[in-house]
Amino acid sequence: QTPTRLADYTPPNFNIEAVSLDFDLNPKETTIRSQLTVTRLAPGPLVLDGEDITLKSVSLDGKTLKRSDYSLTQTQLILKDLPERSLIEIETVCNPSENSTLMGLYVSGGRFCTQCEAEGFRRITYYPDRPDVLSVFRVRLQADLKDYPYLLANGNMVESGALDGGQRHYAIWEDPFPKPAYLFALVAGEFDILEDSFTTMTGRDIPLTIYVDPGDASRAEYAMDSLKRSMKWDEEVFGREYDLDRFMIVAVRDFNFGAMENKGLNIFNSSLLLADAATATDMNFERIESVVAHEYFHNWTGNRITCRDWFQLCLKEGFTVFRDQEFSADQRDRAVQRIKDVKALRMRQFAEDAGPLSHPVRPSEYMKIDNFYTATIYEKGAELIRMLKTMLGEDDFRKGSDVYFERLDGTAATVEQFLESFEIATGRDLSQFMRWYEQAGTPELSVEVESPVNMPVSLTKITFTQKFSPASGQADKQPVIIPIRWQAIGDTGPITEPQLTLLKSKENAVSLPDMGEDFSLSILQDFSAPVILKTRQTSKDHLRLMGQDPNAFKRWEAGQTLARELIGTQAKAIESGQMPKVNKALRGYCQALGKTLDDVNFNSSFKALALTPPAATEIIQASETSDPIAVSLAGEWLSRAIGDTLHEDLLNLYHALSDEGTFSPDAHSAGRRALRNRCLSLLASRQDPVVAGLAIEQLGTATNMTDELAALMTLTKLGGKRVETSMTEFFEKWKNNPLVIDKWFSVQGMRKHDSGIEAIEALVNHSAYDPRNPNRVRSLIGSFAMANPHMFHAVDGSGYAFFTQQVLDMDSRNPQVAARLLGAYEVWRKLDAKRQGLIKAQLRHVIGAAPSKNVMEIANKTLGE
Ligand code: HT7
Ligand code: ZN
């Protein structure tokens, strides 16, 4: 198989001026008639993509073509010698009910729906399925009225009516904005609806409708509220107004991803749309708010300006993630949001960049584009936009984005054109910044501080140095521009103003006049660049920053650095069979946490984060090699030490933060619940029967899912007989709510089952387990692989063998989801030799099993042989 390469990009030979699609919807056999008005742009044939569809007929300017008039392969329909302008009509047939890939047109819960990004449209009809072919779409849908009372497509509905004496009906939709095929969508079925409206900045009234499963309308209220806040925010912060006459969101349960920004008709995984106090956690509410915003923001960053080719994916995804992060920061707490985003970046993107799947934010080649919806494209892509804003400042950043929206509206653009817009607006040269998009790997930023020398005046020299490891086949990496926000902090607070240094070359030194007192440097405030920081700072520095840094992000970071060091040292001790030790550093860390808890300047969300040491994945990814179970045990040891040292404070706080009464999903109330449940979890690290009593009581009396689930998880951590009954009762209580049962499977996947892997195998055979539903599979198998180190990394290899079998099983139905699951093996080079061998054998087994192209690409790259 040859990869697709950025260097080979050529513009299309034809423009599709207009496309008209006619769908006769039937679950087993849907007929699609398409009419393409085609005009020539360059010499050459018209290449139309197609996959898993049956071609019935092709005609050119009204004349049916013979088989010898065109060439047809498994993946393309090619028409040669076309005139300058022509009308091509194509009839195809597909089988939506048998489409288990969930790409193209498929059936979910008895309803028709589509997923076309990245290359799903070709599973519907033959078409130039590439993002640089933009066209205006007219869509006619017809279906049985009783089973499919709603017929939806992009844009505005222009006509509808009855057919066959009222048995069937039709609807016609027109989208006036030219769009690539990946933004096409249709939905047909029976729904409950939630309706509202939004008045735009120019006074246009936009009806908003959310379509959900019958009975779920009230669970869409938070999503609706998030949508209206997003629309307002985009007007206020980026000057972007909504353009169509209506906006629709549909919730579906079978979906490969989180959600999809189809023009005017967003489709959501129901797990990212439906929420109420009883069934959704605060984390669910938070995610719904940010994903609703993300998909809405795509209307400008993605739809009005789309990508020239899939190599430019970060252009829409990085910018849109940045916009949704900023939206959440404005809706909630900026420092807390930044901490959460950086935590996620380190867990997912730093791990990806440190492993065999490392790639640049703008890759230069791929086998399957579906495999490139990665943390690097999304999260690191967003960090690049954030750095750009830090370097340019608020006003110039806005000027640049205005130029971008004006210059490139209605086009399929590149990263170069995006940066050019900022150059035009600000007169700055951003050519060096482009390296961030082209070089894979996380740069290391080292900081050396030389004590004052008295010649001629007393100065402290601070030297910043950057280093890139020669990862992912890019040996010769050039220095990138790194914005470093820093400040000197003394024992009673800051002793300089915050500084911004732009490190452009390999090394750069700055001087600081003698401050006359000892200080610690607070470097990378607000995490001003996505780099790994290397300093010679000691526990004393970290403790000083934990207590005195005015930058909340750095206060949290100082605590994390201490915790990381403590866990790392403890893990090595466990590996060599030593007993855990309580030392000065541990005592200092716990005391500093105690002070943070007492500090009235910090809110509960911040305190909950401060009380959460880094996850094992983060420690493993930052080390050379390690035994994942030792790291996990060391993490448990640290939590126990915190629980022991702060026992009384945590218990008091737990009681003081008891349920406020009426539930509200707002940041303040969610923060209180997060802190209270964090206290419970830390208290439970001590295996204390009093704490077990608290958890049992909380489980029985909880009035919201956040508290109920936290109690259930605490009980599973404590172990004992009570766990099985609690799990069964929870299941019985919620068995009719699929989203809660997903949570139940997740807790099961993360549990340390005494009976070993058989317990997880039994869950795969549970009557509520459905291997065709990605949410359910991710709940059990995903959480097992990502959050159950004891069982997944079992040294006898049983966890790996089970996991591989599940991935291959999924691959036979849904290659995209299978490939994504297989990413759990990316960590293998960071593990001990024994586990490295076990995982390599599993990857070879996968390759030998003739998997899909998606899985083959991930397996080959992960193995790297
Ligand atoms: N732009 C959307 C990507 C997406 C997707 C990609 C591959 C397969 C299925 C998919 N569903 C949605 C999501 C987003 O970033 O907003
Ligand atoms: Zn997106």
Image (cartoon, rainbow, N blue to C red):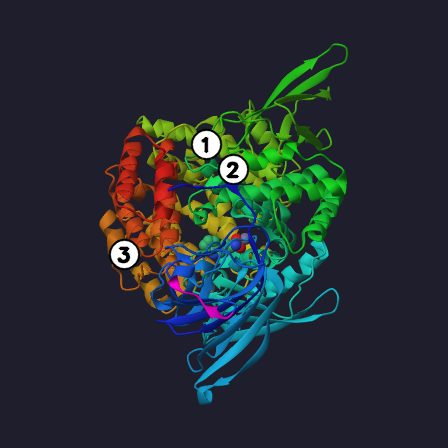
| Residue 621 appears left or right of 745 | right
Q: Please tell me which residue lies in front, 556 or 83.
A: 83
Horizontal and vertical percent position of residue 195: 58, 74
Name the residue carrying label 2.
Answer: 360
The reply to whether discs 1 and 2 touch (Cβ–Cβ < 8 Å) is yes
- Looking at the image, is mark 1 or mark 3 nearer the viewer? 1
Q: CA distance from mark 1 to mark 3?
A: 36 Å
Q: Amino acid at mark 1?
A: Ser
Q: Give above or below for 64 relative to 328.
A: below
Q: Mark 1 vs mark 2: which is more N-terminal? A: 2
Name the residue carrying label 1.
Answer: 472
| Residue 686 appears left or right of 410 | left
Q: Mark 1 vs mark 3: which is more N-terminal? A: 1
The reply to whether discs 2 and 3 touch (Cβ–Cβ < 8 Å) is no
Horizontal and vertical percent position of residue 65: 43, 65
Horizontal and vertical percent position of residue 801: 25, 44
Please identify the quarter of the rendering in which residue 415 is found.
Answer: top right
Q: Amino acid at mark 2?
A: Pro
Horizontal and vertical percent position of residue 287: 52, 56
User: What range is drawn magenta here?
Assistant: 62-67
* CA neighbours of label 2 inside 10 A, class few (<14), some (14 to 19), many (20+): many
Return the mark for residue 764: 3
Q: CA distance from mark 1 to mark 2?
A: 9 Å
Name of the residue lying farthest toward the bottom: 165
Q: Residue placed at 74% from the left, 9% from the top?
A: 455
Query: Can residue 303 be seen at all in this image of the molecule?
Result: yes
Q: Give above or below for 613 relative to 283.
A: above
